[in-house]
Amino acid sequence: MATRPGPTNTLTDVRGIRVGHATRIGDGWLTGTTVVLPGPEGAVAGVDVRGGGPGTRETDLLDPRNLVDRVHAVVLTGGSAFGLATADGVAQHLYAAGVGWPMGAPGEVVPIVPAAVLFDLGRGGDFGHHPGPAEGLAACEDAHDGAVVQGSVGAGTGARAGGLKGGVGSASAVLDDGTTVAAVVAVNAWGSPWDPATGELLATRCGLPGEFDGVGVPDPAEVEEARARAVAEGHRAPLTPGMATTIGVIATDATLTKAECQKVSGLGHDGLARAVNPVHTLLDGDTLFTLATGERPAPDLPGLFELMAAAGDCVTRAVGHAMLAATTVTTPRGDIRSWRDAFPSAVSGG
């Protein structure tokens, strides 16, 4: 099984994967877009949609029964259904570079760009401010293969989770045979990533050795105050469809089929369920994609088992990093506190 994280402990530890963000804050904005780009040849992909209020693009194409077996980008974005327009900017960026599904003569390509959205409308003050093609393009231009920037950026800019600030988080693992698997998530859940009884981040229970050192259990007084505040804010926010959602991408350098990628995404949702409670509710559109770059051979059955188990653990750990990296924001509707600011006693030096 996985014994160590990759060099950056983020999605880009999978060779050939790049990640970029576009972030909009201020003047009524609190939203953004994250794009995951494999190499120009694309990657085999699968998806598993579990939430009751999803907003997606090109997920039917990823059904193993269907023809297209590669994608050229995956978009994670705020803006609810409006945010799906960000994929247009990504597709145009790829088309200009000649990247896409070949349709005939040179340059005649159609980029395959699945996408998933989360709900953050109005959190910056203006309900009409949402990402579009310009943000998709900007995220592509920002994409790099260095450590993924985490916290209140990209698709996690306007995210909330369990009454606190959500965000983008990532984690990776290297298996004993050298295979790398990793995940990036934008955590915007209706459920809570922290235990209401103790304030502890659920994900920290699943960290690799040393990964969450310095992160502990908060003082009970802080927990009581946070719990009361979350209840009060919940009473002011009526339940409406699709008002939350955690979305993400798992990647590996192994060679996998579309069906295997779909199964990896399913195990990723198991990891999400270890980090957020409740999960996959009617108010969430929880969606996880999986990309397989194929730089390493196809695993045997024991290797595939280990890869899938590690993928779930990476999603759990990524949620923990998202909550730890998120920062408090002040909006026209009040502050959205980070977990660190809500529970300073739980963080060494905090």
Image (tube, rainbow, N blue to C red):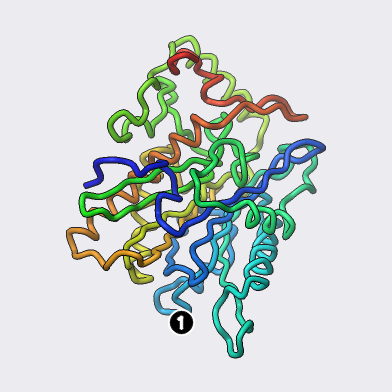
Query: Can you say whether 99 is above or below 323 in the image?
Result: below
Q: Residue at x 35, y 44 (%)?
A: 6
* Image quadrant assignment for residue 25: top right
Q: Is residue 181 left or right of residue 131?
A: left
- In the rendered image, the residue lying farthest to the bottom is 104
Of residues 14 and 192, the one drawn nearer to the viewer in this rendering: 14
* Image quadrant assignment for residue 258: bottom left
Query: Can you say whether 57 is above or below 219 in the image?
Result: below
Residue identifier under label 1: 67
Query: Can you say whether 327 is above or below 140 in the image?
Result: above
Q: Residue at x 63, y 71 (%)?
A: 97
Q: Position of residue 262 (x, y in %)?
A: 38, 64
Q: Position of residue 188 (x, y in %)?
A: 56, 41
Q: Is residue 296 left or right of residue 238?
A: left
Of residues 118 and 106, the one drawn nearer to the viewer in this rendering: 106
Q: Give the residue type that dot 1 points to.
A: Leu
Q: Residue at x 47, y 73 (%)?
A: 70
Of residues 190 and 39, the one drawn nearer to the viewer in this rendering: 39
Q: Within 10 Å of the Cα at label 1, are there few (<14), some (14-19), or many (20+) other Cα atoms?
A: few
- In the rendered image, the residue lying farthest to the right is 27
